[in-house]
Amino acid sequence: MVERELHKWHGAGNDFLIDLGGVPQWWTPERTRALCDRSRGVGADGLIVGEVGERVTMVLYNADGSRAETSGNGVRCLAAAVSRSRGQRQVVDSVVSITTDAGEKSVELTLDDTRGVATVDMGVVTFADPPSGAVALAYVGNPHVVVRDDESWTVTRRAEIAQTMSAAVGGANVEFLRYRDRGHLTLSVYERGVGWTMACGTGSCAVAAAARRAGDVDDEVTVVNPGGELRVSFRGEEVFLGGPVQFVATVYWCST
């Protein structure tokens, strides 16, 4: 029997279990699925394995055990978890650099023990030809299909659309976008390897970048996710994601 210490954090409801032990290979897809199961496990949208030394590296697994390139909310939560694990529970504008499968991410963190605000430089959003019926196909280190939402669609219909759109591009997160005004967008997201989530950081960047590209929003955008608000800002072509981070619990998970 092996016991792992995990720290649960969330960013606007997008929740992660964080293992700071730095052994990604130990987490098989079967173990990850069992851990993230909300009925029989601890429950989370994903598992983050962080290796903490002079540098911090991040490996992210979706709830279904598949490996993902990056997560805007996940990297923000990891920065907070690392700071707290180092005994730095009260920090202002501290910078944590994290290496992900999508490259180096710099996170600016203000933390008051169990809660804080973190902003990460997500780089440049790039675009490709979207599948039929979509507004955009955007890449924020990971792929996103942006769809203009229709209030007449049921949740089941949206899930069907998301699965079709994702399959059309070989796997992607799918965002359903509604416009409010030039400074506010509303988002619901069906994540690859997870399903419906309360928030998506890279998805918020994707919809904001798509709307900005179309000339529909300004350089500062609040994206209203089901679990809370995230802030997306553009400095030239660089996109920055900011929002809350919240510690939930330390848990101990046993597995053979």
Image (cartoon, rainbow, N blue to C red):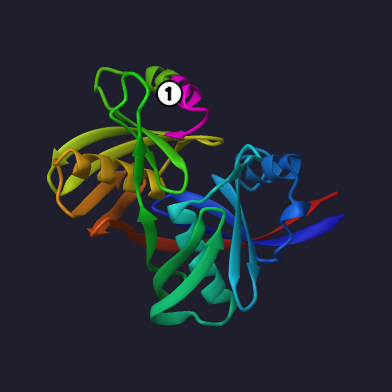
Q: Residue at x 54, y 36 (%)?
A: 194
**Circle 1 residue:** 165
Q: In the displayed structure, would residue 34 be above or below residue 251?
A: above
**x, y percent for residue 85:** 59, 75
**x, y percent for residue 166:** 47, 27
- Magenta segment: 162-173
Q: Residue at x 18, y 38 (%)?
A: 214
Q: Find out whether residue 165 is within the magenta segment.
A: yes
* Callout count: 1
The quadrant holding residue 157 is top left
**x, y percent for residue 218:** 14, 51
Q: Residue at x 74, y 60 (%)?
A: 23
Q: In the displayed structure, would residue 131 be above or below residue 8?
A: above
The quadrant holding residue 188 is top left
Q: Find out whether residue 207 is within the magenta segment.
A: no
- Relative placement, left or right, of 118 versus 24 is left
- Relative placement, left or right, of 8 versus 199 is right
Residue 247 seen anywhere in this rendered image of the structure: no
Q: In the displayed structure, would residue 105 be above or below residue 153?
A: below
Q: In the displayed structure, would residue 163 be above or below residue 53?
A: above
Q: Residues within 10 Å of mark 1 (few under 14, many from 20)?
A: many
Residue sitting nearer the eye, 137 or 16: 137
Residue 234 seen anywhere in this rendered image of the structure: yes
Q: For the N terminus, which image quadrant?
A: bottom right
Q: Amino acid at mark 1?
A: Met
Give SS at disc 1: helix
**x, y percent for residue 108:** 39, 72
Residue sitting nearer the eye, 214 or 32: 214
- Relative placement, left or right, of 90 versus 99 is left
